[in-house]
Image (cartoon, helix red, strand yellow):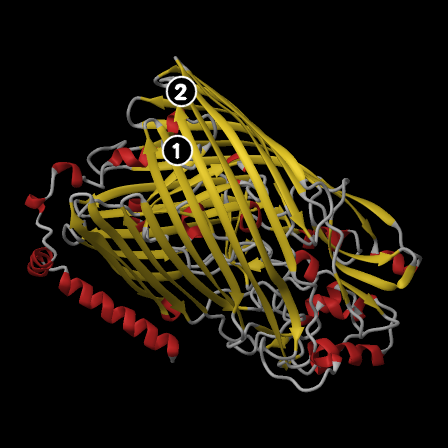
Amino acid sequence: MVCTQYFRTLLLCFLLLLSLLSPKAQAQTQDSLLLQLDRLDRDNVRDDLASSANDKVISGSRSERKISDLPFPIFVITGEEIRRNGYLTLADALKRLPGIRVSQPGSGIEGETFLMRGLQGNTYAKILINDIPIKPFVVSGMPLGANLPIREAERIEVIYGPAATLYGADASAGVINILLKESERPIYAQADLGMGANGFKNLDIMFGGKIGRDKRILQFKVYGSYTAFDDRAVKYDLDSLYNPETYQTLLQAQDVPYINRPNYRGGVGTPVLNDLPHLSSTLGVELDYRNWTLSFFHMTRRDHSSIGLSPYAVSYANPLVFFGERINTVQLSYQKTINKLQLKANLNTLWYRTDDQSSYRYVVPNLSLIQISPVQDSLNRDIDELYFSGNRFSSASSGEVSAEILLSYPINKNIELAGGFTALGGTGDPLANFNRFPPNSVTLGNNPINEVIQASSATFGDISAFVESYINYEKWNIILGAQVFSRQTDYLQGESTVINPRLAIQHQFSDQFSLRFSSGRSLRYPSPFFLSNSYTVNFNNLESLETGADLIPEETFSAELGSRWKIGKKVSGDLSFFYTRTNNLVNYAIEIDTNDINRIRLGYSNDNDSFAALYGIQSGITFKNLISSIGLSGRFNVNYTWGEEQRNISSIGGLLGGAEEILVELDDIRSQPDWIVQLDVEFRPFRKTTVLLENTFMTESLTQNTILYQFSFLADNDQLFNSGYYTLDLNINYQISKNLAAFFKINNVFNTEYAGIDAAADADGLIYNPQSLRISRLGINYRME
């Protein structure tokens, strides 16, 4: 009911906005604010639709430069592409970039997920809005849905590979910077309204402008969105994928009667599968006055908590069981140019909190351990009563504050020097599961059955400084820099002060061809999430469940050799050969205490023997207006990779004859297909109609839980792979008038059943993560610029 009222309120605002933006209303508004165009100087008015802005980026060097001058792979998704192609989420947009694999849905905790250079982007990529980091430090990965202001973006800049020099820790896979629309116009607005299958509804609104005159001008921007639908079209392959018998056999747990568990609903092999709804919203405000900018951003997301998990582990019967969170950021920025010195200072705060009603209904989750443990039925009942009966609530919260100073100075026309200093600190409670009551609820007594299972609160402090030179000499472009980074935490081990170097060189042989080389290093500090969700069960004392893990920072190194080339004005391409290696890779495993067989650990660990190495060839060809009569344009991407993973584990097979260390070696990177091929074709069959066909082909890939299954003797070889697939998405855009357009979009036209990125690396996950079948929607876009 509350969600429906919220949507109606936004819809009313949408209609009101359209009425206010009629030509008559525009004139009245401008008169009332004394903003007639003839009262403004020419310098105060610019055409923000100039295409030249789309070939320039700021994320590559923290100052605006042409893409062609930057010696590393960087791609831009323009706001026009986002709106014309009907993209609603970050994953929608990233899906079209070379070598990126997305999962929609991904999981209940992280929403939609994506893979970038063999690493999960939610965890290993730095995601920013207007250069502001938005991932809380206590989460496993950035939760994604329609909660980011994608429709309001002027462009999205995507850098591949480590970028720690400029953006600090946790930028191992790359950087994704969502830059919101800017305009010098007295007033501008845009609005989108959509509806579709499965109760889909969406509303995005943004308006802004200027108040004042001369130098006393206040620029403002307000935007908001609401997206919701009733169900995901992922319930297929019922006889195998959603059959609890599949997982009981897989885990060799024939003695565990799931059908008698208190939270199970359904018959033998036929669980009740209810709706899997989604809801997300955003609200943002930005004020600019002279050299000052104040911005506020709020986002919420809710997905069914069972997404990607097996019906043997959790129940799908209740559509109101969900995982949700809200994130708020406030930033104050100051910019000034003194002679040639450019100064920018930022003060930023970020707050994160899970929804108080976030919960699961467990059936036989991994933590029960009964299927692999020589324990009695009485212990089974004790574990259920302590941790799994009824609704079990989850909670996490954190707060962070950062201060940043950036300086850049052009020494001469060929050399620019940049540097910066950042201080960041935060504290919070990592994700705690299995609580019988919601957070902040009143409970009686100190009965351990009412206590939440969680690790201690986590605190961290970062201090970093970087210096970088940009050299442009004749046909050479060189970036050389380094960052000194220090982190102090109370929950990690390992080195605390490191130096991350960066080197990138490009030679422009001609206007049609350039060759480049780049390399970099980045650290990722494992989130306290991984500690609070690592459990040690002592079967001699079930009430003292331990949490925690001995983790050290992960290190990612990347090197790349690439080229850009053009054939005339219509065809251009990018080709690169890359190598990425992540050491001390965090993995999930079930391990036995080698000194005590009654102590079993389920959780995350890493050491110097754990790594993932990926080699790849990434290529893309872009063609624009190849056949001018129909405006034929598009892009063809081919990504081929190969690699290996390695880690040490204590085999749970040791339960049968004593624990032992096993070196696990995989001949590929989990979730990473060898081939990813993408072909986008856009054309105009009629003057006002644009058609876009998005084709995606992927080969098979190893599952995330390959290590658990293969080396614990829990699965046969066929269950270690997700099959390859081909999908087609269709989008039709019709320009009704200069300011108004309509679109019709179909995802997965051929109704393909295929797997996305696995939601879990443990035994609680589905054997493959089903992706949505055919979904259609339509809507209208309004622009007043």
Left/right of residue 4 with respect to residue 271 in the rendered view: left
Q: Vertically, is 482 above or below 524?
A: above
Q: Position of residue 285 (x, y in %)?
A: 33, 57
Q: Are marks 1 and 2 in contact (CB under 8 Å)?
A: no
Residue kind at label 1, given as amino acid type: Ser
Left/right of residue 52 with respect to residue 553 in the rendered view: left
Q: Residue furthest bottom?
A: 444
Q: At 52% across and 42% down in the image, what residue appears?
A: 422
Left/right of residue 73 with respect to residue 482 in the rendered view: left
Q: At 62% across and 81% down in the image, what residue appears?
A: 265
Check disc 1 and report the residue beneath it.
Answer: 63
Residue 614 visible in image? no
Total number of numbered discs in the rendering: 2
Q: Vertically, is 267 above or below 692?
A: below
Instruction: Give the mark toward the camera: 1 or 2.
Output: 2
Residue 164: name its quadrant: top right
Secondary-structure class at tag 2:
loop
Residue 624: name its quadrant: top left
Check disc 2 and report the residue beneath it.
Answer: 411
Secondary-structure class at tag 1:
loop
Q: In the picture, which quadrant includes the N terminus? A: bottom left
Between residues 712 and 82, which one lies in front from this camera angle? Answer: 82
Q: CA distance from mark 1 to mark 2?
A: 15 Å
Q: Position of residue 752 (x, y in %)?
A: 48, 56
Q: Position of residue 439 (x, y in %)?
A: 58, 75
Residue kind at label 2, given as amino acid type: Ile
Q: Position of residue 578 (x, y in %)?
A: 57, 30
Q: Vertically, is 392 above or below 367?
A: below
Q: Circle 2: is it few (<14), some (14-19), or many (20+) Cα within 10 Å? A: few
Residue 30 visible in image? yes
